[in-house]
Image (tube, grey):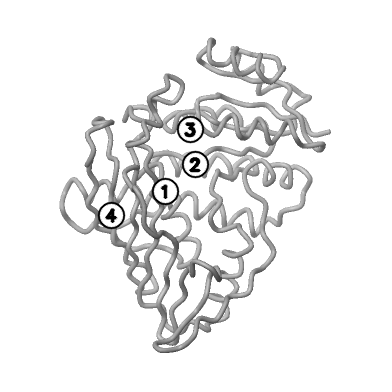
C-alpha cells in the first residue's frame, strides 16, 4: 500500500483528488497538513485521516511514500522547498509556481535532490492527444505555421469562487493572477509540449465581467515559437459557449478537433481523416502512483518538468506584455 500525505486542501480540485485516492486499492491518504486549521480539520474529518498543523513533522514521517500539494498558487514554492529534500515523489497542482524566478529555484532544488515532481496538467496525456503527438513527431503535418487553443469556461458568471475555501482564486497575492494563470497555464503547457519552446509573446489580458475585479477573467496571447510557428491562446472564466479545442496548421494539412470524429486532419475540399489514438499516460494521482512504483521513465518525467517550468515563464511574459503593450521575450528557466 502506498501512503500519501496531502499538503494543503486549498485547491478546488482537492476533493476530487481525495475521492480518487479513497477509491484506489494501491494507495491511501494517511495525513493531511494545512496552514488553515479549520479547513484542514474539516477535510481530515471528512476523509477519516489525521490532521497535522506541523509541516516539518509531516514531511519527516518515514511512513509516507509521496506528497500531494493542493495549496494556493503562490504557496507552492514554500511547500516544495519543504517536501523536495525528502526525496519522495510529489504531485503539485498547477501552475508549478507563479514566477520564473521561483520556477528556477524550485527546478534547481528538484534536480539537486533527484526528486520526482509533476504538476496537475492533463491535456497532453489523453489517448487522443498522445496520438496527436505521435502524428506531429512523424512530420506528416509538414512545416507548422500556426496553431490555436482555447481553454475556457464560465467560472466568473457561475460564481465558482464565491465559497470561502476557494475565494483565494480571486486574490492576486494568493493566486498570482486570474483566468490566464488558472486556465491559460493549461493551454500554454499543452502548446509548449506540442510545439517546443516559445521565444516571445504579446498578450491582452483583462476583466470583462467585473465579478471578481481583483484578477483577470479573460485573455488572449500570441506566442512565437522557436520553430517559427505562431499560436493563439485564449483563456477565460467568461466563456458562455462555443467550440474549443486545438488546431494546428502545417504546409501539408491541418489538424483539428472534429465534433464527432475527435482529432482529424484535412486538406482543402478533402474529407477529414481521423488521427489514430495512442496509449494514454497517467495524470495527477495516477501519475504520482506510477512515479512511486517506478513506472515512468526519467525522460518522460524530465520533459514534463521542463514544459511545466517553461509554462511559468511564458505565462509571466504574457502578463508583462499586457502591462507594457509590447512583445516580451520569454526568459529561460
Query: Which residue is at a point 76% across and 29% down the rendered structure image?
Result: 28
Tell me how far mark 3 sits from mark 2, CA to CA: 12 Å
- Which numbered tag is attached to residue 77? 3
Helix, strand or loop at mark 1: helix
- What residue did someone put label 4 on? 220
Q: Position of residue 89 (x, y in %)?
A: 67, 39
Q: Position of residue 189 (x, y in %)?
A: 46, 54
**If you read the primary sequence from the N terminus, does the residue marked by circle 3 or circle 2 appear first?**
3
Instruction: Tell whether label 2 touches label 3 (CB within 8 Å).
Output: no
- What residue did someone put label 1 on? 185
Residue 180 location, quadrant: top left
Tell me how far mark 4 sits from mark 2, CA to CA: 20 Å
Helix, strand or loop at mark 2: loop
| Numbered disc in front, either 1 or 3 | 1
Up/down of 325 relative to 266, above or below: above
| Numbered disc in front, either 1 or 4 | 4
Helix, strand or loop at mark 3: helix
Instruction: Tell whether label 2 touches label 4 (CB within 8 Å).
Output: no
Query: Which residue is at a point 52% across and 16% down the rendered structure image?
Result: 35
Instruction: Tell whether label 2 touches label 1 (CB within 8 Å).
Output: yes
Tell me how far mark 3 sits from mark 4, CA to CA: 27 Å
Tell me how far mark 1 sits from mark 4, CA to CA: 12 Å
**If you read the primary sequence from the N terminus, does the residue marked by circle 1 or circle 3 appear first?**
3
- What residue did someone put label 2 on? 94
Say whether residue 202 is left or right of residue 324.
right
The quarter of the picture where the N terminus appears is top right
Tell me how far mark 1 sits from mark 3, CA to CA: 17 Å
Q: Position of residue 36 (x, y in %)?
A: 50, 14
**If you read the primary sequence from the N terminus, does the residue marked by circle 3 or circle 4 appear first?**
3
Amino acid at each position: 500500500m502506498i501512503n500519501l500525505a496531502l499538503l494543503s486542501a486549498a485547491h478546488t480540485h482537492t476533493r476530487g483528488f481525495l475521492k480518487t485516492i479513497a477509491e484506489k486499492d494501491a494507495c491511501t491518504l494517511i495525513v493531511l497538513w494545512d496552514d488553515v486549521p479549520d479547513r484542514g480539520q474539516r477535510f481530515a474529518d471528512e476523509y477519516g485521516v489525521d490532521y497535522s498543523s506541523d509541516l516539518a513533522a509531516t514531511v519527516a514521517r518515514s511512513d509516507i511514500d509521496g506528497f500531494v500539494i493542493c495549496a494556493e498558487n503562490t504557496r507552492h514554492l514554500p511547500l516544495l522547498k519543504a517536501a523536495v529534500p525528502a526525496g519522495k515523489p510529489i504531485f503539485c497542482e498547477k501552475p508549478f509556481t507563479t514566477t520564473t524566478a521561483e520556477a528556477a529555484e524550485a527546478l534547481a532544488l528538484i534536480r539537486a535532490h533527484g526528486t520526482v515532481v509533476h504538476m496537475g496538467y492533463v491535456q497532453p496525456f489523453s489517448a487522443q492527444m498522445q496520438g496527436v503527438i505521435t502524428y506531429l513527431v512523424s512530420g506528416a503535418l509538414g512545416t507548422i505555421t500556426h496553431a490555436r487553443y482555447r481553454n475556457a469556461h464560465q467560472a466568473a458568471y457561475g460564481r465558482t469562487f464565491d465559497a470561502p475555501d476557494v475565494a483565494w482564486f480571486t486574490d492576486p497575492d494568493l493566486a498570482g493572477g486570474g483566468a490566464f494563470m488558472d486556465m491559460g497555464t493549461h493551454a500554454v503547457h499543452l502548446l509548449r509540449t506540442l510545439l517546443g519552446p516559445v521565444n516571445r509573446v504579446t498578450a491582452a489580458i483583462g476583466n470583462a465581467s467585473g465579478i471578481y475585479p481583483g484578477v483577470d477573467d479573460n485573455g488572449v496571447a500570441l506566442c512565437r515559437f522557436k520553430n517559427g510557428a505562431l499560436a493563439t491562446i485564449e483563456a477565460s472564466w467568461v466563456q458562455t459557449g462555443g467550440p474549443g479545442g486545438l488546431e494546428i496548421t502545417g504546409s501539408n494539412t491541418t489538424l483539428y478537433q472534429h465534433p464527432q470524429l475527435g482529432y482529424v486532419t484535412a486538406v482543402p475540399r478533402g474529407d477529414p481523416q481521423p488521427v489514430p489514438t495512442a496509449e494514454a499516460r497517467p495524470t495527477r494521482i495516477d501519475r504520482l502512483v506510477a512515479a512511486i512504483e517506478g513506472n515512468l521513465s526519467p525522460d518522460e518525467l524530465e520533459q514534463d518538468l521542463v514544459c511545466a517550468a517553461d509554462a511559468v515563464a511564458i505565462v509571466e511574459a504574457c502578463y508583462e506584455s499586457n502591462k507594457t503593450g509590447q512583445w516580451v521575450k520569454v526568459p529561460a528557466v
